[in-house]
Image: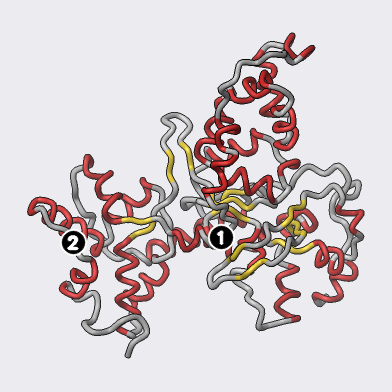
């Protein structure tokens, strides 16, 4: 059966129709485990050096600080709320400074633990904030929830994106905290610095850009290709695009809000990718990977260690970026260049970066040069160091011949 015939004959796969369905959650399955095995095999092939570099474990923090960077290009390609907007609401959301003058009525007769359990597990985010706006006593009750304070302190931008996209009524504070305390990508096991809002799944940028399980489509596409009416999608989690923002790389400008839904809500996690195939058949010139809608439904989310409270945003390797830039300037195809091409965009946790650092010779040289410069009271010019070590060709910039 071809794709267009399937689009006319496919029926609702969910028992009882689409009404009263719980939000679609992606869980690890056989496909996920297969992807992890393939990536593990590829990582073994991408090892730049088999010799493990030795260093003092106490220097791990300095190594991360000097030889890594935040991959802002990827973070800016998803929903990214300007932090300056937070100052208008951050004070009222993150803290309470007023003494309550009224109580919660009958709710005040409940034990505080039971109130917190209701707020965490049974109130969706929109209802939670509606309850919080009742009076000052309600603000104090919600603020005293440890998970609430953690999320508003470290992930206020993600919370803002959730409310501006109008997806807040589908998920609870428990769902949010589950993502905040999860470090690795659901699919590949690497550091997952992003969350797909339509399915509330933590993932890395590479999986967000390519995996069919995270495919999203507009409501018009769903109703057209799955032969459904908009009424059928009434109880399916949907979100509005945050308009007036540039997404993807190179930039894709969203001029007005778009109503979208995760394809997995309709087809199930094993039937995703159908809409993407139709798009490519109808317009082969349209960007397939990553499709802009994937990035327009995701936002950056840091990782918080539940026990220690340590926050990680994800770091990329300066050495791999230098190696990739050197290959571009050399304008040569090589096995080493292919390795740097695949490693340049990978984001690591701090633990994962230290493992990578032991096998990245360029980062090791940068670290040693920084130590030497620190002893002499000097600074390290990365461009000059790259030319001196032969990583860059003299007189050649990116794209120059």
Say which mark, if any, is on residue 273. Answer: none
Residue where numbered disc 2 is placed: 380
- x and y percentages locating residue 224 in the rendered image: 86, 68
Q: Which residue lies furthest to the left in this view?
A: 376
Looking at the image, the residue that sits furthest to the bottom is 401
- Which of these two is toward me, 166 or 175? 166
Sequence-wise, the earlier of marks 1 and 2 is: 1
Image spot of residue 131 (x, y percent): 73, 27
Q: Which of 109 and 188 is in front in this view?
A: 109
Say which element carries label 2.
loop
Label 1 crowd (10 A; few <14 / some 14-19 / many >=20) = many
Using the image as rendered, state which of residue 111 and residue 188 is in the foreground. 111
**Mark 1 residue element:** helix
Q: Is residue 53 above or below residue 102?
A: below
370 left or right of 77 in image: left
Q: Splitting the image into 4 quarters, where does residue 264 fall?
A: bottom right
Marks 1, 2: nearer the viewer:
2
Task: Report the side of 50 relative to 202 (left or right).
Answer: left
Q: In which quarter of the image is residue 90?
A: top right
Quarter containing the C terminus: bottom left
Give above or below for 317 relative to 338.
above
The residue sitting at 26% across, 63% down in the picture is 49
Gap in Å between the C-alphas at discs 1 and 2?
A: 35 Å
Quarter of the image with the N terminus in it: bottom right
Residue drawn at 67 percent across, 66 percent down? 254
Q: How crowded is mark 2: few (under 14 residues within 10 Å), some or many (20 or more)?
A: some
From the viewer's perspective, is residue 231 above or below residue 119? below
Residue pictured at 66% horizontal, 50% vertical:
197
- The residue to which callout 1 is attached is 207
Vertical relation: 252 (above or below) 172? below
């Amino acid at each position: 059966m071809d794709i267009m015939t399937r689009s006319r004959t496919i029926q609702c796969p969910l028992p009882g129709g689409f009404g009263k369905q719980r939000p679609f959650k992606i869980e690890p399955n056989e496909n996920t485990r297969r992807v992890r095995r393939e990536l593990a095999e590829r990582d073994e092939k991408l090892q730049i050096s088999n010799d493990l570099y030795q260093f003092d474990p106490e220097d791990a923090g300095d190594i991360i600080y000097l030889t890594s960077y935040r991959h802002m290009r990827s973070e800016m390609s998803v929903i990214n709320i300007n932090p300056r907007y937070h100052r208008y609401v951050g004070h009222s959301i993150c803290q309470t400074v007023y003494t309550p003058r009224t109580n919660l009525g009958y709710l005040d007769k409940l034990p505080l633990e039971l109130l917190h359990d209701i707020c965490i597990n049974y109130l969706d985010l929109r209802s939670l904030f509606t309850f919080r706006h009742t009076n000052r006593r309600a603000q104090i009750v919600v603020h005293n929830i440890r998970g609430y304070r953690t999320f508003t302190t470290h992930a206020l931008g993600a919370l803002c994106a959730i409310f501006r996209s109008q997806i807040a009524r589908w998920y609870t504070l428990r769902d949010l905290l589950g993502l905040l305390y999860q470090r690795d990508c659901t699919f590949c096991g690497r550091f997952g610095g992003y969350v797909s809002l339509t399915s509330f799944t933590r993932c890395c940028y590479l999986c967000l850009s390519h995996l069919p399980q995270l495919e999203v489509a507009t409501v018009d596409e769903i109703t057209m290709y799955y032969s459904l009416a908009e009424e059928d999608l009434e109880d399916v989690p949907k979100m509005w695009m945050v308009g007036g923002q540039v997404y993807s790389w190179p930039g894709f400008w969203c001029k007005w809000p778009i109503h979208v839904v995760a394809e997995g809500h309709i087809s199930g996690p094993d039937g995703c990718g159908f809409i993407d195939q139709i798009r490519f058949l109808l317009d082969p010139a349209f960007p397939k990977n990553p499709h802009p809608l994937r990035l327009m439904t995701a936002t950056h989310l840091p990782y918080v260690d539940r026990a220690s409270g340590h926050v990680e945003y994800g770091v990329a390797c300066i050495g791999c970026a230098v190696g990739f830039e050197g290959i571009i300037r050399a304008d040569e195809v090589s096995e080493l260049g292919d390795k740097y091409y695949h490693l340049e965009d990978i984001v690591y946790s701090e633990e994962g970066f230290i493992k990578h650092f032991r096998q990245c010779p360029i980062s090791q040289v940068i670290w040693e040069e920084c130590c030497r410069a620190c002893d002499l009271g000097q600074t390290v010019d990365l461009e000059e160091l790259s030319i001196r070590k032969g990583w860059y060709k003299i007189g050649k910039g990116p794209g120059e011949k």
